[in-house]
Image (spheres, rainbow, N blue to C red):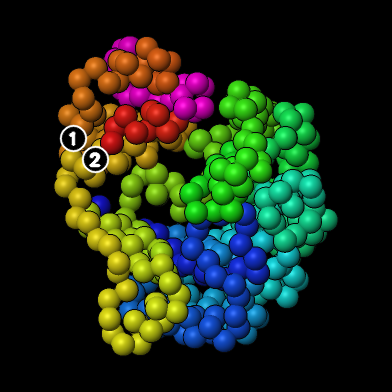
Amino acid sequence: MDTIKGLYIHVPFCRQKCLYCDFYSVSYDKETAGLYVDVILRQLNELDPDFSTIYIGGGTPAILDTGTLDKLLSGLKKFLRQGVEFTIETNPESLDEEKLRMFIDKGVSRVSIGVQSFDDKKLKTLGRVHDSSQAIKAIGLSKKSGFENISIDMISGVSGETVDAWKRELEKAAGFDIKHISCYSLSYEKDTPLFRMKEKKEIVPLDEEIAAEMYACTADYLSKKGFERYEVSNFAKQGFECRHNLDYWDNDPYAGIGPSAVSYIRGERSANIGDVYEYIDRYEKGVTLVSYAEKLSDIKMAKETAGLKIRVREGIDYDWFRKKTSFDIEDITEKGVLEELRKDDLIEYKRDMSTGEITGIKLTEKGFLFSDTASSSFL
């Protein structure tokens, strides 16, 4: 449990904040970005190089100028042992051939492109700064540069969207020779412009039944195209599941660097301050960067492990869970909860093929649709 598997680095700069996004980010400023990356590099020098996955997210990491981006990626060289999965998030408008060649040269093994949609009207509704032609070009350039492991993000459930329109988007996405697709249903997060538009009735959320139909369409269509659903919102060709996220769903320890980044180490969860300017200032002054920390009890860690692990395709194996947490699944759930979830058709029992013995639980098709309900039952 003590081995820290994943390293997450937050690059909190964007050209323009999307209307639905509640992740911490600020407008890109070259000087601030340069100072920030210098701080990150000094933090990296303090870490042991034993991570199995590295994930640079944002924000828009590729918005950094080539010199600053080169410095950041070069600073990660000592972590790139054989077999390390190294992902960088990108947006279509921030990608070009020079940066993609740099990614390859610096050991990046996986690129995740924030496409979100191939429909220009929908992209405007979401507040994206790129258009569909830039998205298509970004995928093509990534393939041309030599990336085999390419992932794209897609969003469904935008106001006024139809199931047929969403299926056309899926057809477009699956038509590229890529290995991973993340499909998220649009949510209206507080403190976002889209949420305020909904509150003022300037935008009408999609009917829940239509959103559910879209999700069913996603799972069905992508499976026919060779993309297996390995987690509620994530679909991959065999062998191309995101290992960084799989470790997260296993509730393995990870380190987070950057403003608002979260770490989970030795049973303690901590969050950094959510302000890049204060982050730089505090680091220079030697003041703590942590704004919140919580030491989790053994049973709370076990509950969170169950709440996360139930989201993946194979669900929770009882033997695995016992070895991982030292608890039986019944020890961390209220009496009758599992049977209630089963009666509601949210989970099903896994059984040994030869003995018929119950060996675990996993989500049903309905359970994937109501995964948050199933997950929260363990917390």
Identify the residue shown where x is 62% and y is 57%. 18
- Determine whether label 2 and label 1 are within 8 Å by CB: yes
The image shows residue 289 at horizontal and vertical percentages of 32, 74
Identify the residue shown where x is 45% and y is 60%. 53
Q: Residue furthest right?
A: 133
Q: How many discs appear? A: 2
Q: Quadrant of residue 94?
A: bottom right
Identify the residue shown where x is 60% and y is 75%. 28
The image shows residue 218 at horizontal and vertical percentages of 65, 31
Q: Quadrant of residue 44?
A: bottom left
Q: Is residue 101 left or right of residue 363?
A: right
Residue range in magenta is: 353-370
Query: According to the image, label 1 marks what residue?
Result: 327
The image shows residue 182 at horizontal and vertical percentages of 59, 44
Q: Count residues near mark 2 (Cα–Cα under 10 Å), then give few for <14, some for 14-19, many for 20+.
A: many
Question: Is residue 180 something one can see in this rendering?
Answer: no
**Quarter the C terminus occupies:** top left
The image shows residue 275 at horizontal and vertical percentages of 43, 72
